[in-house]
């Protein structure tokens, strides 16, 4: 194996580890959030992004980017959450063509109820991944990236 082959293998190994950690976390979160709160990981992610946004609203394009969705997938998701009374769309006061999405009081309540579950399951999934020798270095790197107040 040459130097170039070694570099490719190192990147591939890193990608596989990242995919494994992501899958472990997403599966655990999906199961817990769905069973306890009736919300998917991506729905939680959208509501969390809105909650963390100053003023509690975002344009659809921003929301799609925050949830790693296409614009059309974000629109469908917002429609589903709007139908459940968790989100609302409002016209932008400055640009009547712009539409913002924001949490409703019911959405804020559901998010507040689901956040402890999300945080606990995330912590447990990272601890589980840390116990796997192939994944432990990646979990350590993730912990190094976290703000000191979260570690």
Image (tube, rainbow, N blue to C red):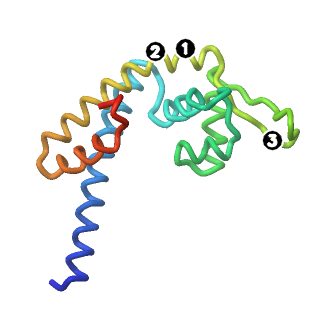
- Residue 110, compared with residue 15, is above or below; it is above
Position of residue 49 measured from the top left corner of the image (x, y, whole percent): 55, 34
Q: Are marks 3 and 1 in contact (CB under 8 Å)?
A: no
Judged left or right of residue 151, residue 43 is: right
- Badge 1 density bin: few <14, some 14–19, many ≥20, Cα 10 Å: few
Q: Is residue 57 left or right of residue 70?
A: right
Asked whether the beta carbons under mark 1 and mark 2 sit within 8 Å of each other, the answer is yes
- The residue under the point 18% across, 85% down is 2
Say what secondary structure mark 2 lies in.
helix
Residue 11 marker: none
- Mark 2 — residue? 113
Q: Where residue 24 sits: x, y (%)?
A: 28, 41
Which label sits on residue 98? 3
Place residue 32 in its image quadrant: top left
| Quarter of the picture holding the C terminus | top left
On screen, residue 79 above or below 140: above
Q: Which mark is residue 109?
A: 1
Tell me whether circle 3 and circle 2 mark residues in contact (CB < 8 Å): no
Residue at (67%, 47%) from the top-left corner? 61
Disc 1 to disc 2, C-alpha distance: 6 Å
Q: First in sequence: mark 3 or mark 2?
A: 3
Q: Quadrant of the N terminus?
A: bottom left
Q: Label 3 vs label 2: CA separation?
A: 31 Å
Q: Quadrant of residue 62?
A: top right
First along the sequence among labels 3 and 1? 3
**Secondary structure of the residue carrying numbered label 1:** helix
The residue lying toward the viewer, choosing from 126 and 77, is: 126
**Left/right of residue 27 with respect to residue 88 in the rendered view:** left
Query: From what the image shows, is residue 38 above or below residue 28?
Result: above
Q: x, y (%) of residue 72?
A: 65, 48
- Bin the neighbour count of mark 3 within 10 Å (Cα to Cα): few under 14, some 14-19, many 20 and up: few
Dot 3: element: loop
């Amino acid at each position: 194996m040459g130097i170039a082959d070694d570099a490719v293998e190192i990147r591939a190994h890193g990608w596989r580890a990242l995919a494994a950690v992501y899958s472990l976390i997403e599966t655990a979160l999906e199961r817990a959030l769905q069973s306890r709160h009736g919300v998917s990981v991506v729905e939680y992610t959208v509501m969390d992004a809105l909650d963390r946004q100053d003023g509690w609203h975002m344009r659809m394009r921003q929301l799609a980017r925050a949830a790693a969705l296409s614009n059309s997938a974000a629109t469908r998701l917002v429609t589903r959450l709007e139908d459940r009374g968790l989100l609302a769309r409002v016209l932008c006061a400055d640009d009547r063509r712009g539409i913002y999405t924001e949490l409703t009081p019911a959405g804020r309540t559901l998010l507040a109820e689901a956040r402890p579950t999300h945080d606990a399951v995330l912590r447990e999934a990272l601890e589980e991944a840390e116990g796997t020798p192939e994944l432990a270095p990646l979990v350590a790197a993730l912990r190094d990236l976290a703000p000191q107040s979260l570690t």
